[in-house]
Image: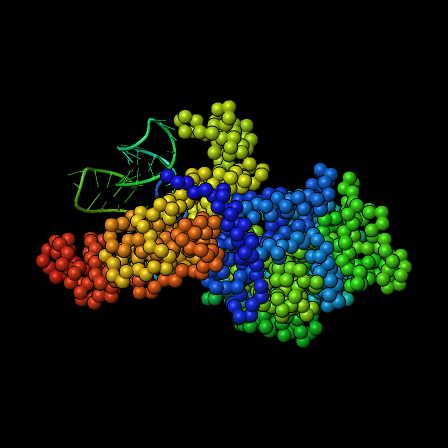
Amino acid sequence: MSRYNFRETEAKWQRIWDERGCFAAREDAARPKYYVLEMFPYPSGKLHVGHVRNYTMGDLVARYRRAQGYNVLHPMGWDAFGLPAENAAIAGGIHPAVWTGDNIATMRGQLKRMGFAYDWAREIATCHPEYYRHEQKMFLDFLAEGLAYRKESWVNWDPAENTVLANEQVIDGRGWRSGAIVERRLLSQWFLRITAFSDELLEALQTLDRWPERVRLMQEKWIGRSEGARVRFGIADPHPNPPPLAGEGREGAIEVFTTRPDTLYGASFVALSPHHPLAQRLADEDPALAEFIAECDRLGTSEAVIEAAEKRGYRTPLEAVHPLDPTRRVPVYVANFVLMEYGTGAIFGCPAHDQRDLDFARKYRLPVIPVILPPGADPANFAIGDTAYVEDGTAFNSDFLDGLSVAAAKRAVGARLEELGHGERTIAYRLRDWGVSRQRYWGCPIPVIHCPSCGIVPVPESDLPVKLPEDVTFDLPGNPLDRHPTWKHVACPACGGKATRETDTFDTFFESSWYFLRFCSARAPNAFDRAAAEYWMPVDQYIGGVEHAVLHLLYSRFFTRALKQCGYIDLDEPFAGLFTQGMVCHQTYQNAEGEWLFPEEVAAAPDGSAVDQSGRPVTAGRLEKMSKSKKNVVGLEAIVETYGADTARLYLLSDSPPERDLEWTDSGIEGIWRYVNRLWRLVSEPAVLLPPPGAAIPPTLPPALDALRRRIHKTIVAVTDDLDKFRFNRAVARIRELTNALEDLPAAENGAGAVLREGLEAATLLLGPMMPHLAEEMWQALGHKGLVAEAGWPKADPDLARDEQVTIAVQINGKLRGTIDLPRDAAAVAAEEAALALPQVARMLEGRPPRKVVVVPNRIVNVVA
RNA sequence: GCGGGCGUGGCGGAACUGGCAGACGCACUGGAUUUAGGUUCCAGCGAUGAAAAUCGUGGGGGUUCAAAUCCCCCCGCCCGCACCA
């Protein structure tokens, strides 16, 4: 019995596709375009099975759309700047460029071995000056447009990576990559003004109807729009020597942000963030306050800490004047729960209608003044206990607001504040500008020069790219660019005097924020050819992990808008369709000492339990995402060597819905390998002689063959629908049903060969996007001269895709009692008659007429006895 | 705490818009072929039951001729955000 020889065939077809240039993309206005993109990898060393799952889905979409006649762009490249390269240099003495280049070579070889249909002529690596020079130009354009700026600010400092992190890169108070507790530092940094697009980025989420709901929700929450008001409380200072107050927005006022201006008459204190400038200034003269602030800093911001931390405050000598009633004064606190980064860094506390304020007020014995009355409550008796009242209601105890609804009171207070000049309605966002400076070597140099007399001077465009120097050392901590003997010393482009280069490099999310545009014309002398980009963009189907739901996907949306503003392209949204695939998981194993074991170190004992190589018992742990630390990794080489690329690809598509996590099992892939061989036998040793390709199918067929033909055409319809909807596992199941039916071919019947050929050809073409090498080999074995890659998608005959005869379930009182076969769309009366004629039905009715009969055409007859 | 998702055989999962629950596969069981293992082929495979039948989609209620699917309550798991004023 012949076995499918993937070793020979996979290499052969890869060579043929390559020689024919099957997957080279060219702009062609006459054809509908389709841009398929998988999130490009960081060249960390080797591909893992998770990468391969991602690219297998992308390749399926690319080949499927190509077969349907779309002009497909499907490129691949390398997100090549990043810390692991630099860490490798520090640890192993290998230059980041060499390390990265080696990894790219390895991973490119692995991708080619998988037979993915990429246009390799468009391959890019972001660490090449031919790539990053363009983002240096973009940065200069952003600078000119005011979309990039420099400011001193408190930043997130990752002590393990010795660099700054963006807010998006801090997870639970730790660096997203290093896991180190993030510290606060005051540094001068470059920022991109993503907040200029807060509203646009939020609004446009609604247009992204081919994005997963949860990604849109995550971005919505991240942008965090809140409508409210800024309110200024005057400062009444009983202190004999008032500290200077210059620079606080308005002279002598504390500005707060609130979403509940309707509760302003319930104010019983004002609280400042420990990092508020006024708090800092007060601390200069008050050692106890300085100590309080230092304590708040020590506590950190991690989830667990916040959960446990109680609300604490420090009462300053200041009093704030109520903006609507100058006779009212409230104390000013510095409080640990007020964030400097949100709103204005100061709040007013209304304990009756905010739980945090209530906790705080109870602790410090501050008044609790209810000002919103729940519907139906008695104003004389209404009091707040341990729970703040945060629902809707009617204003009371509130002067001119009394009797108004919450919404109306908000409007009325806003108007009054604006009249008095004590505040205005406004919108606050959680989103903050994107800090892009990183104190690292292996990134794109920021193209500016610091001149002692001219200040910040952009590098002239003619001097781009600012290339990374290659002769750097990694033996000392800190940024190698900063201590390079000559690189940073330059003449000021403005005055010609001595000046220094910016030694920070860009956050590596900078590169991935526009690479999808570069792919449209990967060798263009400018960033991208506008006509090519406007032909290919937006990306029709983007595929990647959900871990970038906020980071990369939000930055790219911002970048596209910023480039539009700078005149690069007329485009708002880069990714029209997004699919987030699940992870690949694998069983974990631990020995008695709790050490993790590689899967190949675990064997089965005679009794079936898991043991290690010396026979000691091993605990099989839970399924986890494959990771080096848990050792539950599966090497791609071994799989491809044993089963071939196609088998691995089909397994990754078939076992779980693509959005869900997939468990890697050896028995699962063995099952696919058996299936591959069954398919190959089906075409290489057909049960009957096949007519030549293109031969006509007899117009009338025996019933068994007619049914088989109908199944073929129904399969084409169902698989097409499943692929459109990303239900790859179901599509595989349908094709397997078809091949099962073809194996049961009634070979003796007249016309069996013609129907078998039709079925095998359909199965081959349907499998083409999933197992492209095997499909080509099958196509050839079926006598075709051309390629599946160029053959087009099979078309179903709509008449054959519908059954002429349908099986209808017959229920009595909702319970299945039998089935009847009827012509499709038979009259309800006929169905009812046939159902009542069933002996089971007659027996259950015992001669009485049914009370009611429900007939759903082509589906069910329910007899109600 | 807030937001979202999920819960179906031993396992991964099917079930269009409320209409035959368990497709397809993995594992397993029995048999055939084979020197043996593997492969291949045939049969079985939700539970109880000899059978007829009954029960069965996390639990409890409800709507309906009919519920995995819709509604209410509860339980569990996963993901995201989190002192956001």
Q: Quadrant of the N terminus of chain A?
A: top left
Where is residue A297 shown, x and y percent of the image?
70, 48
Q: Residue drawn 33% across and 65% down?
A: A798
Residue A569 appears left or right of B62: right
Q: Nearer the viewer, residue A373 or B45?
A: B45
Is residue A259 in view? no
Residue at the extreme bottom of the image, as rendered: A419
Left or right, residue A252 beside residue A79: right
> Of A478 and A280, which appears nearest the observer?
A478
| Residue A370 picture location, percent across and down | 56, 62
- Residue drawn 74% across and 48% down? A441
Mark yes or no: residue A442 visible: yes
Picture mark count: 0
Q: Is residue A204 above or below residue A215?
A: below
Judging depth in this view, the residue of A542 and B6 nearest the camera is A542
Q: Position of residue A694 (x, y in %)?
A: 37, 59
Q: Residue at x 43, y 26 (%)?
A: A605
User: Does residue A710 appear left or right of residue A124 in this picture?
Assistant: left
State the scheme by which the image is colored.
rainbow
Between residue A223 and residue A28, name the one nearer to us: A28
The quadrant of the picture occupied by the C terminus of chain A is bottom left
Q: Estimate the x, y position of residue A237 in percent, counting from the top left.
A: 76, 61
Residue at 79% from the left image edge and 63% from the top image edge: A462
Quarter-of-image position of residue B31: top left
Name the side, left or right, on which A364 lies relative to A133: left
Residue that extends furthest to the right in the rendered view of this protein: A497
